[in-house]
Image: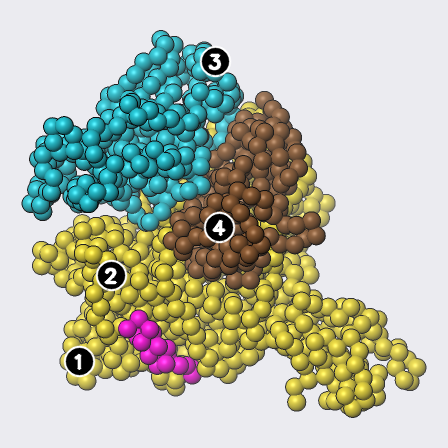
């Protein structure tokens, strides 16, 4: 039995019609937000990571109906109105932190939520923050560089914790 | 005189193609493709026994599920497929051979309905005795995995043995090993084993197939590394002409060999080509926990190596026996067996060589291509045995290696002279950078520290006639399209080709595009495997770009009435300084030039290029000898500095240094990425990866809950990736492949480091915490070696290596 | 996963009513990080999923200086890990929370969900054992309290009756200056189930120094290593000998299985090792003043 769920998706109000068993992952992908990937659908890989009300979460473990009234953010929502990449996205490109690109959207959303809470992190803190996102191609090293670079860029732009990006 | 000028040519650090789309989330992978409501979804029903006759498959309940359209079984799609040996059917027919083998395919209007239908299919089996131990399977013919082996087609260079479980047997017979052993001062005989491992790409397989009901033409969208190889395999299997099959390969989320050849497409076709289904596209998405049950794994191996060494420390003879556990299919697995075989003296010069490399059938998921393709297996054993040998004869392991190193010009085990390389330099740098010869105390309280080293090498493992071709089109606004059917799965092939084209045409890289493969528009390329693409496709791309340049220069020369040699193309502007001309490439390049004689000349400028290795000769089937068995070798080395917690067996890597002789780094950002990524993958495999089964052959590690790979917290804090550039003669720019190489030797380097730290030799991978702990306990009891082999009743190492002769 | 109906009651009473109505056909969901994955793998198939996440009274973590900390059923693992009172007074719980899965899953998984799933390797279970938590239950028979030591009865089994929901847990203050830790051994450094987990709480109470030691992933039910606790009782600076004996006693109290994650023998050895380390760490912290 399908039910409606209303929430904000990348800044826009949406209504999805979903079954209770439909995960937020599948509902978003069905709607066309395909940056959110399915890599394992058991919470082990992180390719489905989105940000819900400022918390990075694995959308394969969220039922779509649970998104009611919440704000969901994906990498599509980080791209500016004129196509400008968010500083985190730009840092990933600049530091060679992307190879196949399948882990990238989830990795970026994890980094996004993390840097909002912790704008000047240590190397260890970055690793812990990304420990739930697997990458098989890059060996993670350029990803750490990208997050450091993004943190610096965001600090320079006057990013404040919990504030507007 | 060089007639092109660019800032983004060969050797520059550039932004990579498609990285922006990947960061923005707009790049569409196969699972992201959208079809209309006509799309059907497929889900496989799988065997619950490892070896058995199919008594019945009852899908009557499945058909009652709302949305289920059709259930197809093996009998409905009797076609045999295979890259080198046609031993595989997409679904079991009459017999099942491993737990998880597809026996039926449920096709439904939605994924959920297909899932529900799949759960309602009941298959009954009459169990047969299974065989899981590859060493036993190789020598004991009482249980045959493929009794009909003689009926399977295969290529000439693969030799299966009907009546046995041997899918392929590669031999090297060079010199006289028995004589050399009898005269040797030292004999070292050791064995190493390793279970199957998984590729661990984050994107599971996904495939959509559609048959045109009027023409029978097939369209396949798939997570394939090699669109054309896929087409070839499907065509051969169905006995269709190539032109009837179109393969579209969207970007893939990691391959590592696991999406090479044909993986799940035939299974999907079994649904899409069914008379009750055809016309509608069928999508087969393989859930993570079924990935290892549907497609390749890396073969498990048991390797025994015997060395004969003279009084000066020179290795005079080697006898290799490799058992590769290829599961139920050797269609691809037959080749890593060869690849290991024809590299079986590793990085060393050894005059007398005897190698037996076997692909052995067992009742398990099947082996295929995996980054390194036989070399991680070979070096996983060889670099450990070399380390043991050095210590046995009382020589420093680095000195021993350098003393026996395969210098340029010396023959490999096939008799082919080794190409130029800078391995000495690489060894020196690695030794230096991890301070291999310094015994340093552990930084963690109570832990012990050790350092280890291993050499690496590999040649592209491919048929002698693996060909590439490319088309370069210059468009009417000075932009360029490059049609090269390599799959850029993150290694950066399209960036490298764009740099090559930028180099050849003097056009900035931002103006160059490489679309993803489509057999309908792209010209043929064999496969994106073997670290061959920058080299082989690079030759084709360079030729195509050069041809386009020649045509362009000739047209402008006539247009401006100057010599072609006086024209340059600089950052997209065509110039002739003599005549004061400077014009951007414009629509003339597409529609022709109005020449001084009044005629319109030209038309669209297209360059084409083809390449096939000219001089590779297949090794002799009896002796494995060939004056040119492979195109070239890329060599390298890995050094690892680790610390071990003796109380738990936990291993932490302090530092890794890894270097490879790449000939020429076309795209430094790509080369760095490959070395870093492959090194971490190699460390992950060495420390924690392995596929395990219960006594009934059921895979206990099918998903990421129990098949663990390195996370951000498992990565060494200090990874030094570097390369040397000794140019390769036959090459577009002197470059050789490096994609696979960094995966090959971290594991044996780790084993050597653990020996240095603990004083006990572990002969079984992975070197996980429990195993390392066991080794430490064994050492306390006076043991010198730890051997764990899941199928041996006798776990004592000394007996184990005597067990099978 | 297979279809189910979902109810999202807004009150406990309503939730209990729904559970009673559907009996064994219904399962409860808080964070859902266990139950959703189990459903996807076809390990469970409830006809009705009762989602508690809209019930306001289940949210939050409150600290009562005279009673202890009360953790609501919907408090996420990260909420607990970041809570100031948890940090100050319940270090074992904090360690346990931070060792659980990864930071993303911890934003959704709940502390009490880990307890109610009752999986032997549940990371938060040993901490509840050493803090001697009290579980507050609401059900058709009204409210009742269950001491944690009675709660888990076997792998994925607990003593809740049909229709009962754990609404909160109270962890009493240890009753004196205390130090605690949870040490976990896994196959890799992140996002893995425990092969062995040992929680230790050292308390300087009125009667002197006591230790509470609980081991996870090594028996069908959580193990309170009372033998080890007795050996250490009253000793503020246990030497190597005593630590060895305590470790061995804890190992003897455990009864692990061999599975694909670890062998029984390794687990037994690691219980011994982790117990020694945990006790030494707690004793050191109480010595050094980094205690609560």
| Marks 4, 1: nearer the viewer | 4
Q: Which chain is cyan?
A: C
- Measured as percent of width and height from the top left, residue B238 is found at 58, 52
Whether pointer 3 and pointer 4 mark residues with C-beta atoms closer than 8 Å, the reply is: no
Residue at 43%, 66% in the rendered image: B675
Q: Image check: B423 left or right of B668?
A: left
Structural distance between the alpha carbons of marks 1 and 2: 43 Å
| Marks 3, 1: nearer the viewer | 3
Circle on res. B184: 1
**Rendered-image quadrant of the N terminus of chain B:** bottom right
Can see residue C64?
Answer: yes
Residue identifier under label 2 = B443
Structural distance between the alpha carbons of marks 3 and 1: 85 Å
| Marks 2, 4: nearer the viewer | 4
Query: Quick check: B752 above or below C95?
Result: below
Q: Secondary structure at mark 2?
A: loop
Circle on res. C227: none
Structural distance between the alpha carbons of marks 2 and 4: 30 Å
Q: Secondary structure at mark 1?
A: loop
Q: Image check: B502 left or right of C118?
A: right
Residue at 70%, 43% in the rendered image: B213
Query: Quick check: B524 above or below C70?
Result: below
- Measured as percent of width and height from the top left, residue B332 is found at 45, 59
In the rendered structure, the colour chosen for chain A is brown
Structural distance between the alpha carbons of marks 3 and 4: 43 Å
Magenta part of the chain: B417-435
| Marks 1, 2: nearer the viewer | 2
């Amino acid at each position: 039995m399908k039910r409606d769920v209303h929430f904000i998706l990348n800044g826009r109000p949406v209504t999805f019609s979903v079954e209770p068993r439909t995960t937020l992952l599948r509902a978003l992908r069905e709607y066309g937000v395909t940056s959110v990937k399915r890599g394992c659908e058991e919470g082990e890989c992180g390719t489905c990571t989105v940000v819900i009300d400022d918390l990075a979460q694995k959308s394969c473990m969220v039922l779509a109906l649970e998104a009611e009234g919440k704000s969901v953010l994906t990498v599509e929502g980080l791209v500016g109105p004129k196509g400008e990449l968010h500083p985190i996205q730009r840092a990933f490109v600049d530091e060679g932190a992307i190879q196949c690109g399948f882990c990238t959207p989830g990795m970026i959303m994890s980094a996004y939520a993390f840097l909002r809470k912790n704008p000047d992190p240590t190397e260890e803190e970055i690793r812990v923050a990304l420990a739930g996102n697997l990458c098989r191609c890059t060996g993670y090293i350029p990803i750490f560089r990208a997050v450091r670079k993004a943190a610096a860029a965001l600090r320079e732009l006057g990013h404040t914790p919990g504030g507007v990006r | 005189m060089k007639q092109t000028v660019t800032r983004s040519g060969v050797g520059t650090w550039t932004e990579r193609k498609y990285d922006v789309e990947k960061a923005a989330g707009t790049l569409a992978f196969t699972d992201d493709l959208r079809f209309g409501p006509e799309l059907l979804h497929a889900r496989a029903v799988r065997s619950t026994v490892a070896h058995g006759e199919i008594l019945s498959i009852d899908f009557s309940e499945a058909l009652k599920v709302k949305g289920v359209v059709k259930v197809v079984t093996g009998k409905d799609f009797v076609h045999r497929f295979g890259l080198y040996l046609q031993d595989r059917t997409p679904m079991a027919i009459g017999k099942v051979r491993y737990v998880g083998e597809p026996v039926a395919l449920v096709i439904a209007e939605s994924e959920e309905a297909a899932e529900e239908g799949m759960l309602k299919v009941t298959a009954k089996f009459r169990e047969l005795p299974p065989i899981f131990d590859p060493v036993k399977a190789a020598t004991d013919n009482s249980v045959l995995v493929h009794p009909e082996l003689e009926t399977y087609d295969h290529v000439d260079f693969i030799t299966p043995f009907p009546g046995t479980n041997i899918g392929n047997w590669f031999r090297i017979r060079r010199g006289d090993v028995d004589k050399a052993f009898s005269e040797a001062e030292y004999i070292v005989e050791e064995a190493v084993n390793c279970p199957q491992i998984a590729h661990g790409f984050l994107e599971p397989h996904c495939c959509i197939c559609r048959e045109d009901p009027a023409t029978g033409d097939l369209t396949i969208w798939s997570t394939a590394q090699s669109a054309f190889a896929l087409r070839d395999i499907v065509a051969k299997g169905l006995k269709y002409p190539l032109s009837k099959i179109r393969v579209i390969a969207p970007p893939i989320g990691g391959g590592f060999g696991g999406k090479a050849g044909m993986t799940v497409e035939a299974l999907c076709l079994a649904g899409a080509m069914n008379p009750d289904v055809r016309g509608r596209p069928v999508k087969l998405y393989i859930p993570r926990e079924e990935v290892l049950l549907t497609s390749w794994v890396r073969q498990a191996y048991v390797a025994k190596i015997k060395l004969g060494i003279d009084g000066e420390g020179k290795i005079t003879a080697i006898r290799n026996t490799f058992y590769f556990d290829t599961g139920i299919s050797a269609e691809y697995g037959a080749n890593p067996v060869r690849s290991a075989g024809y590299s079986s003296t590793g990085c060393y010069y050894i005059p007398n060589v005897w190698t037996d490399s076997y692909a052995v059938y067992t009742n398990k998921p099947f082996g295929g291509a995996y980054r390194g393709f036989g070399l991680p297996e070979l070096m996983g054993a060889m670099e450990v045995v070399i380390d043991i040998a050095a210590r046995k004869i009382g020589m420093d392991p680095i000195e021993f290696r350098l003393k026996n190193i395969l210098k340029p010009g010396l023959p490999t085990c096939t008799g082919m002279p080794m190409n130029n390389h800078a391995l000495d330099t690489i060894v020196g740098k690695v030794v230096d950078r991890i301070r291999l010869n310094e015994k340093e105390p552990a930084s963690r309280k109570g832990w012990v520290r050790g350092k280890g080293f291993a050499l690496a090498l590999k040649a592209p493992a491919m048929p002698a006639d693996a060909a590439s071709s490319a088309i370069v089109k210059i468009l009417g606004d000075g932009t360029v399209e490059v049609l090269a059917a390599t799959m850029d799965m993150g290694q950066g092939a399209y960036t490298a080709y764009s740099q090559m084209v930028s180099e050849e045409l003097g056009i900035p890289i931002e103006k160059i595009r490489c679309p993803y493969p489509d057999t309908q528009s792209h010209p043929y390329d064999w496969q994106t495997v073997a670290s061959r693409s920058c080299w082989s496709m690079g030759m084709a791309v360079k030729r195509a770009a050069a041809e386009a340049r020649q045509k362009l220069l000739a047209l402008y020369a006539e247009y401006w009435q100057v010599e072609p040699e006086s024209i340059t193309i600089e950052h997209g502007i065509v110039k002739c300084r003599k005549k004061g001309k400077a014009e951007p490439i414009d629509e003339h390049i597409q529609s022709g030039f109005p020449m001084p004689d009044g005629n319109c000349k030209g038309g669209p400028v297209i360059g084409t290029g083809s390449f096939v290795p000219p001089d590779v000769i297949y090794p002799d089937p009896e002796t494995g000898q060939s004056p040119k068995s492979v195109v070239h070798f890329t060599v390298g080395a890995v050094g690892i500095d680790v610390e071990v917690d003796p109380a738990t067996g936990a291993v932490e890597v302090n530092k890794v240094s890894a270097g490879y002789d790449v000939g020429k780094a076309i795209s430094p950002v790509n080369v760095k990425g490959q070395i870093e990524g492959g090194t971490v993958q190699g460390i992950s495999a060495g420390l924690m990866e392995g596929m395990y089964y219960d006594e009934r052959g059921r895979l206990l590690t099918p998903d990421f809950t129990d098949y663990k790979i390195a996370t951000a917290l498992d990565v060494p804090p200090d990874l030094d990736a570097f390369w040397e550039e000794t140019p390769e003669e036959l090459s577009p720019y002197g470059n050789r492949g490096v994609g696979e190489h960094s995966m090959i030797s971290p594991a044996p380097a780790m084993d050597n480091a653990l020996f240095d730290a603990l004083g006990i030799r572990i002969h079984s991978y992975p070197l996980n915490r429990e195993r390392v702990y066991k080794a430490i306990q064994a050492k306390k009891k006076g043991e010198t070696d730890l051997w764990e082999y899941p199928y041996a009743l006798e776990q004592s190492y000394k007996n184990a290596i005597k067990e099978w002769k | 996963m297979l279809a189910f109906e979902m109810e999202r009651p807004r009150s406990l009473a309503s939730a209990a009513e729904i559970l009673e109505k559907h009996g064994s056909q219904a399962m409860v969901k808080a964070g859902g990080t266990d139950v959703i994955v189990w459903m996807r793998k076809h390990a469970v198939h409830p006809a009705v999923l009762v989602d508690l996440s809209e019930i306001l009274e289940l949210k939050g973590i409150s600290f009562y200086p005279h009673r202890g900390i009360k953790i609501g059923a919907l408090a996420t693992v990260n909420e607990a890990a970041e809570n100031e009172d948890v940090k100050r007074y319940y270090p074992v719980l904090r360690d346990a929370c931070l060792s659980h899965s990864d930071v993303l899953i911890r934003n959704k998984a709940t502390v009490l969900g880990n307890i109610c799933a009752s999986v032997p390797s549940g990371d938060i279970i040993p901490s509840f054992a050493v803090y001697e938590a009290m579980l507050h239950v609401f059900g058709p028979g009204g409210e009742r309290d269950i001491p944690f030591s009675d709660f888990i009865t076997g792998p994925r089994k607990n003593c809740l009756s049909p229709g009962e929901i754990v609404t909160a847990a109270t962890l009493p203050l240890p009753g004196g200056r205390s130090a605690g830790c949870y040490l976990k051994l896994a196959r890799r450094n992140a996002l893995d189930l425990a092969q062995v987990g040992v929680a230790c709480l050292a308390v300087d109470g009125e009667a002197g120094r006591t230790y509470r030691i609980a081991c996870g992933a090594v028996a069908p039910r959580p193990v309170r290593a009372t033998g080890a606790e007795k050996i250490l009782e009253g000793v503020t600076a246990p030497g190597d000998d005593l630590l060895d004996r305590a470790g061995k006693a804890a190992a003897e109290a455990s009864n692990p299985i061999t599975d694909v994650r670890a062998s029984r023998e390794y687990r037994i050895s690691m219980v011994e090792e982790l117990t020694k380390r945990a006790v030494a760490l707690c004793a050191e912290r109480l010595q050094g003043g980094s205690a609560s």
